[in-house]
Image (cartoon, rainbow, N blue to C red):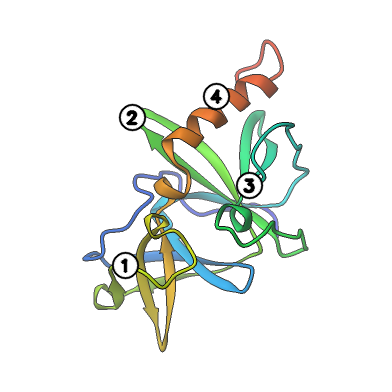
Amino acid sequence: MGELMVSKTATEAGVDADEAGQYLTFDVGEERLAMSIDAVKEIIETPVITRVPMTPDYIRGVINLRGSVVPVIDLGARLGRGGITLTKRSCIVLVEVRVGEEGHVLGMLVDEVKNILEIPREDIKPPPEFGSEIRTDFIAAMGRLEDVFVIILNVDHVLSIQELAALQALRTEVAPSGSNAQS
């Protein structure tokens, strides 16, 4: 698979239900999910992930990305679907999440990236009030693809500010002394 550069900037992790756009679709377990392509920095093959002790189960560990320490979230575990079993199709979607003025690059481990789709404005619906196994604050919108809906994730909520603070502390703990672990 190699490294696939999708977008160099990540301005928003969510999506406005009144706005059409492009969405990266991917599988987590048996479920097809999506996120705004604007949130995606790049997609990489799954490298060696170093587990860090005393972190929540959904934090799979950290990877070395061109000299930077990047935390990796197991999206299956984060969404309550159980941890992802690594296969040759598993990959990491790198996203940039902003907290104030700072951008943080995080990896989200998924079972398989499918494709990039254009979803017309009229096919983007607000998230449901109930009826999903995913926390409703994780859902930015629902995208209709022919006769089925795909859940469009709100990356900022899936990776909350409190968790980002914990991840920043994690970066500091595992960064080799004298190196710059900033993303």
Q: How many marks?
A: 4
Neighbourhood count class around disc 1 (C-alpha, 10 Å): few under 14, some 14–19, many 20 upward: few
What's the residue type where badge 1 is placed? Glu
Q: Give x and y (percent) for residue 171.
A: 61, 26
Question: For residue 100, which numbered disc appears in the image?
Answer: 2
Query: In screen coordinates, is 135 left or right of 28?
Result: left
- The quarter of the displayed image where residue 35 is located: bottom left
Q: Give x and y (percent) for residue 21.
A: 32, 65
Closer mark to the observer between disc 2 and disc 4: 2
Helix, strand or loop status at disc 1: loop
Residue 104 seen in the current view: no
Name the residue furthest top. 178
Rendered residue at 24%/64% (across/down): 19
Q: Which residue is mark 3?
A: 58
Closer mark to the observer between disc 2 and disc 1: 1
Report how far apart the C-alphas of labels 1 and 3 lie in the structure: 25 Å
Q: Give x and y (percent) for residue 172.
A: 61, 20
Residue 44 seen in the current view: yes
Closer mark to the observer between disc 3 and disc 2: 3
Q: Are marks 3 and 4 in contact (CB under 8 Å)?
A: no
Q: Quadrant of the N terminus?
A: bottom right
Report how far apart the C-alphas of labels 3 and 2 lie in the structure: 24 Å
Closer mark to the observer between disc 3 and disc 4: 3
